[in-house]
Image (cartoon, rainbow, N blue to C red):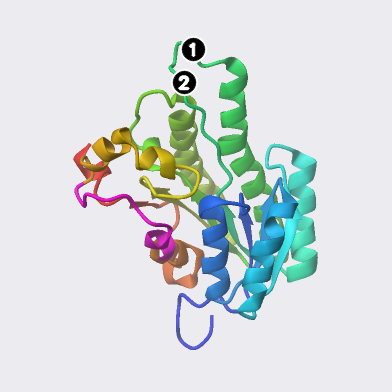
């Protein structure tokens, strides 16, 4: 922390999973603009090259890293590579996640497993491995699990996703209790519906317009609407917060 600014991340090393698209790309840029050195982790390393160049253009360091969050060896290799190249990891943004749309009656076991493995098991493996490094080096740090308001209240045709995000929220609390003595804070960021390239077609459809009318602010979120909460949880500004769930949804969950 420098300049008396608790949100400053200058010199901090961070890992962002699922950084190849959507919110992950945005989170990586946000951390870099706050001064962090960022390991950009995703399955598709080729999709990370342009993002790394963008970050380096504003004089911050970024490195692409291949990562399959469901594979233990891939997780270990990612964290080790990030620490070797960037220094001790202070921040983990557990952002990698997927959804599968289907009714509960038609949802296949393989699709259930794929969602749970990525959204829950993957977050657990990344948190465990990163926390081991933080504890070994004794510097503590911040783990931010990207959950969802659908982990607080459910909707139809997304049973696996809703279940995985609800479990991720309680995993956040359990990790916060276990890791506090090592100076590691674990919090969750729970966005509402945020418009990205991945969901823009749905959100601009008639069904999306109907959904928007149920949001008190009468609009979907923008990626930049999450910046304040992300930087709060990643930085020393939240030094006395752990096990918290920060909701950013335009008031949608308040009315559920």
> Can I make out residue 51 in this image?
yes
225 inside magenta stretch: yes
* Residue 187, horizontal then vertical, whole percent: 46, 53
* Residue 101, horizontal then vertical, whole percent: 47, 26
Query: Which of the pair 131/247 is nearer the observer?
Result: 247
Q: Determine crowd level at label 1: few under 14, some 14-19, many 20+ residues with C-alpha closer than 10 A.
A: few
168 inside magenta stretch: no
Query: Which of the pair 228/79 is nearer the observer?
Result: 228
Instruction: Check the image and report above or below for 246 versus 56.
Output: above
Which segment did they paint magenta? 216-227
> Can I make out residue 240 in this image?
no
For disc 1, the marked residue is 106
* Residue 137, horizontal then vertical, whole percent: 72, 65
Q: Residue at x 50, y 64 (%)?
A: 234
Q: Quadrant of the N terminus?
A: bottom right
In terms of secondary structure, where does tag 1 sit? loop
Q: CA distance from mark 1 to mark 2?
A: 6 Å
For disc 2, the marked residue is 102
Rendering quarter of residue 162: top left
- Specify whether 74 is left or right of 36: right
Q: Residue at x 54, y 74 (%)?
A: 33
Q: Determine crowd level at label 2: few under 14, some 14-19, many 20+ residues with C-alpha closer than 10 A.
A: some
Query: In the rendered structure, are the residues bearing label 1 and label 2 in contact, judged by CB atoms less than 8 Å apart?
Result: yes
Rendering quarter of residue 184: bottom right
In terms of secondary structure, where does tag 2 sit? loop
Q: Quadrant of the C terminus?
A: top left
Instruction: Check the image and report above or below for 54 versus 110.
Output: below
Query: Which of the pair 141/59 is nearer the observer?
Result: 59
Instruction: Check the image and report above or below for 237 versus 180.
Output: below
């Amino acid at each position: 922390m420098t300049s008396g600014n608790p949100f400053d991340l200058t010199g901090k090393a961070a890992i962002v999973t699922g950084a190849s698209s959507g919110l992950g790309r945005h989170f990586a840029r946000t951390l870099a603009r706050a001064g962090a050195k960022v390991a950009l982790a995703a399955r598709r390393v080729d999709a990370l090259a342009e993002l790394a160049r963008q970050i380096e253009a504003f004089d911050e360091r970024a490195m692409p890293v291949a990562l399959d969050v469901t594979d233990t060896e891939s997780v270990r290799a990612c964290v080790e590579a990030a620490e070797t190249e960037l220094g001790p990891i202070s921040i983990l943004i557990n952002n990698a996640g997927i959804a599968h749309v289907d009714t509960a009656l038609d949802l296949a076991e393989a699709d259930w497993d794929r969602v749970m493995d990525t959204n829950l098991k993957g977050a657990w493996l990344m948190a465990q491995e990163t926390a081991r490094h933080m504890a070994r080096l004794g510097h503590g740090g911040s783990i931010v699990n990207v959950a969802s308001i659908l982990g607080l209240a459910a909707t139809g045709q997304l049973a696996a996703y809703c279940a995985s995000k609800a479990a991720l929220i309680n995993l956040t609390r359990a990790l916060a209790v276990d890791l506090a003595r090592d100076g590691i804070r674990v919090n969750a960021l729970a966005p509402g519906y945020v418009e990205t390239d991945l969901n823009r077609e749905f959100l601009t459809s008639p069904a999306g317009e109907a959904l928007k009318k149920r949001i008190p602010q009468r609009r979907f979120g923008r990626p930049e609407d999450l910046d304040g909460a992300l930087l709060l949880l990643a930085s020393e500004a939240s030094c006395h917060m752990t096990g918290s769930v920060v909701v950013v949804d335009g008031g949608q969950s308040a009315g559920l």
